[in-house]
Amino acid sequence: MQKYFHQTRLLLAVDCIIFGFDGEELKLLLIQRGFEPEKGNWSLMGGFVQPEESLDQAANRILKQLTGLDGVYLEQLYTFGEPNRDPKERVASVAYFALVDVSKYEKQISHDYHADWFPLKKVPELIFDQPAMVEMAQKRIRYKAALHPILFELLPEKFTIPQLQNLYESVYDTTIDKRNFSKRVLATKLLIKLNDKDKSSSKRGAYYYKLNMQNYYAKFQAFMNFIPNPDNLMA
Amino acid sequence: MQKYFHQTRLLLAVDCIIFGFDGEELKLLLIQRGFEPEKGNWSLMGGFVQPEESLDQAANRILKQLTGLDGVYLEQLYTFGEPNRDPKERVASVAYFALVDVSKYEKQISHDYHADWFPLKKVPELIFDQPAMVEMAQKRIRYKAALHPILFELLPEKFTIPQLQNLYESVYDTTIDKRNFSKRVLATKLLIKLNDKDKSSSKRGAYYYKLNMQNYYAKFQAFMNFIPNPDNLMA
DNA sequence: GCAAAAGTGTTTTATCTACACCCATGT
DNA sequence: ACATGGGTGTAGATAAAACACTTTTGC
């Protein structure tokens, strides 16, 4: 079959906004760009979409290149396509955001890319329109996490309720009453209490919990009472 | 500056999922495709992104081509990029959805495209991956309209509360108690009651309302009580 | 024994839900 | 006068918010 005539083709890239949580604050994984333009400057991890791969595949490939991780939470965020966003030539970029358990993250691999984690409030100057990508990703996470339990993706398999609360407080840059917080979290039936404690941040120790995966998948989509049937909703 | 070497370029398209509401049910505006492949079959309105235009500009251009309308509510939905979604050659498509006031829609223009409105439940077979686009757009509207007052974009400037309720019932395919509905809607302070009535659907007539634009813009972003500061949230 | 974080309940307040009758008018 | 859709109020249930003290244990 013939191709479409008289149409301009362009490069399509994927950029990944990679979030992690170290127990204290929300962080971004950035690399020092290895080629021109802007070589050596801090950048999101990205790459061009290859001829035989889908966008999701490209995003997963790029994420794995940098972190060594498979099966990470990854979601398409938005496509940025201003004609001159890359000075070299026209490149549209499909931005994805990823939520990573930093305890699984392999430092060695990312060493090659001169990668580093930056607290969201201390992100260095980024290239092109990447600041807008990061800002949008942050808003999207806040938006989505208010309705869906995505933030668990940032935690290790075993976590404590105070850790979880720190995470929410960090994402929303606020403080939450711990009594109300634990009540609400436990009311979701998403957590299973374990018998051992994390004693790293207190003498008394805090009980570990893990996700109830059945309930997790079942409730992931549910988000409001306004809506008659909470299944037809998620994007 | 030199271009990026050894990278494959591809076509980038924009497809518009155009919703309208006629007072009865939610509808989609479709065209009969004018070129191969799939010439003559029902399709979303779309087009290739031109060298000097942004994605938003392309979407607005395409929407105006078909409807004659400017300033329509238009939002980027998702980018579809499976390698073989178009059999002719690789084309990634950035899908946008639009909410149109059908009373402003100009029939003449769209006549050239053999366009027509289809109730969502009676959409004909669509080409390529467009069924997935439509489904995602429908979910996105339900999702977003549960939190933001976007559905007003589908109504004319003057509308009645029963019309508004029909719209919500149509979008969510449900029925709502009219006492609770009008209470909730009026509680938002988004509506200004007018003195004239729409007598087209009852003898008594229903009061017209219009949007309070100040409150509309102010509350557009607000959506939950969970969140401390409802400003940093929207994507 | 004391500092530091973990854990837990109750009351108040706001919001949501269910539900039924009268009104205005064109025919 | 009657059929049709428009408009309104209240009581009960549910969910959210405010708020303080006791427990554990390493030092």
Image (cartoon, coloured by chain):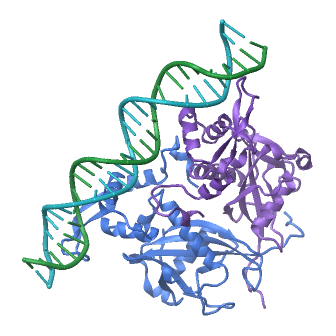
Chain colours: A blue, B purple, C green, D cyan
Is residue B90 visible in the rendered structure shown here?
no
* Residue in front for this viewpoint, B159 or B19: B159
The residue at 55%/44% (across/down) is B187
Residue A123 visible within the image: yes
Q: Residue at x 58, y 37 (%)?
A: B182
Point out the residue furthest to the front here: B195
- Quarter residue B73 falls in: bottom right
For residue B220, side relative to residue B70 (left or right): left
Residue drawn 84% across and 73% down?
Answer: A8
Measured as percent of width and height from the top left, residue B235 is found at: 60, 64
- Above or below, A126 against B190 in this view is below
Q: Position of residue B99 (x, y in %)?
A: 72, 50
B226 sits left or right of B128 in the view: left
Residue at the spot x=85%, y=67% of the render?
A3
Number of marks present in the image shown: 0
- Please tell me in which quadrant of the rendered image residue A210 appears: bottom left
Q: Nearer the viewer, residue A188 or B133?
A: A188
Q: Nearer the viewer, residue A195 or C10?
A: C10
Please state if A57 lies on the left or on the right of B156 as rendered: left
Residue B147 image position (x, y, % from top left): 56, 52
Whether A126 is drawn above or below B140: the answer is below
On screen, A211 above or below A58? above
State left or right for residue A56 relative to residue D19.
Answer: right
Image spot of residue A48 (x, y percent)? 67, 78
